[in-house]
Amino acid sequence: MEKMKAVVYNKKGSPEKLIYCEADKPVPNDNEVLIKVHAVSLNAADYRSMKMGIIPKRKIFGADISGSIESVGKNITLFKPGDEVMGDLASFGFGGLAQYVIAPERALITKPSRISFEEGATLPMAALTALQALRDKGNIQKGHKVLIVGCAGGVGTFAIQLAKYFETEVTGVCSSKNVQQSDSLGADFVIDYTKEDFSKSDKLYNLILGINGNYPLLAYRKCLAPNGIYVMVGGSISQIFKSLLFGWVFSFGPKKMRSVAAKSNRHDLEFLATLLANGKIKPIIDRRYSLDKTADAMNYLSQGHSTGKVIINI
């Protein structure tokens, strides 16, 4: 069996449990492709799954990947060796934190030539989450007033740009260090939560995304316009649990409280890749790490203070 470098989860590994080591190089079946991984971006889904003990079968995390096709199974029709691809492997066993990974072709799209491998790896989970929260759950419409609570980080930075793409008025909530970044991404107003509490204002919003920040559901509901929608995107584990448990209670009447769990979708990913290639959105890359420093990268991301995407270059 051929070997490759990978970062493998080891429950007894100390202290990080993510061990850089040699692992068996995967072999694609007739319906899979083998990808030489160039870049991976980390997501909350990685460290939250690890905390909850939800470990990929091959014990290798990493969902958002970009790379080039190394070989294909005999039933593959969309790709050939040498093609540059990107995709979300969260529904297909993860495995991106390695030199090679296998995936079904439906997990991937062709990477536009104008997008770098790093940029391609930033898109799948974070930008898909932002898009599906705004469009599918939030029913975003031109002219809406949109509040994005936690507008830094991977999802938040894409949410600002996508909300502006849909021609809305965007207010972002973030810490002092991210005010300038949020402003530069197109936010019409930026609230520094260390100096001001958005929930104490009289301003009402058609759509609120709760990405980060520990605010009560009632505070969000108070800030909704009639027929407004709140979409829970992230936050602490306890906050997510409360939203799932009590959100329906607050949804009686015209104001709605919803949550989103992004679903991998090739059509949506192609749409986002086209926006990126055409300069309509851009990824904010906070930090870059090499594969052997993945444990450090995961630790940094899990602290919740990243200002954009965290990339692992293979």
Image: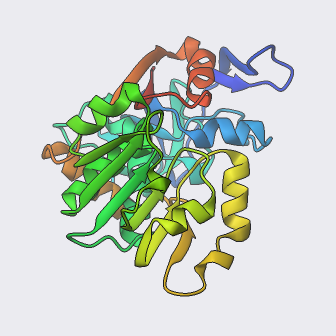
Residue 265 location (% of width, % of height): 42, 61
Q: Is residue 289 visible?
A: yes
Count the numbered circles shown: 0
Looking at the image, is 34 positioned above or below residue 37? below
**On screen, residue 87 above or below 304:** below
Q: Position of residue 112 (x, y in %)?
A: 21, 43
The chosen color scheme is rainbow
The residue lying toward the viewer, choosing from 192 and 41, is: 192
Query: What's the residue at 58%, 19% (across, down)?
Result: 294
Residue 79 vertical placement versus 122 (above, below): below
Instruction: Measuring from the top left, give residue 194's x and y in whole percent.
Output: 48, 33
Q: Quadrant of the N terminus?
A: top right
- Residue 2 in view, yes or no: no
Position above or below: 101 against 158: above
Residue at figure coordinates x 27%, y 47% from the top left: 189
Residue toward you, 113 or 309: 309
Residue positioned most to the right: 12
Q: Looking at the rendering, which quadrant does residue 170 occupy?
A: bottom left
Q: Residue furthest left?
A: 278
Residue nearest the viewer, comparing 257 with 33: 257
Residue 26 shown left or right of residue 285 in the figure: right
The image quadrant where one finds the C terminus is top left
Residue drawn 32% across the image and 70% down it: 140
Percent coordinates x, y for residue 42 in the rendering: 52, 33
Most extreme residue toward the bottom is: 253
**Residue lying at 63% horizontally and 57% vertically, measured from the top left:** 216
- Left or right: 114, with 196 as reference point: left
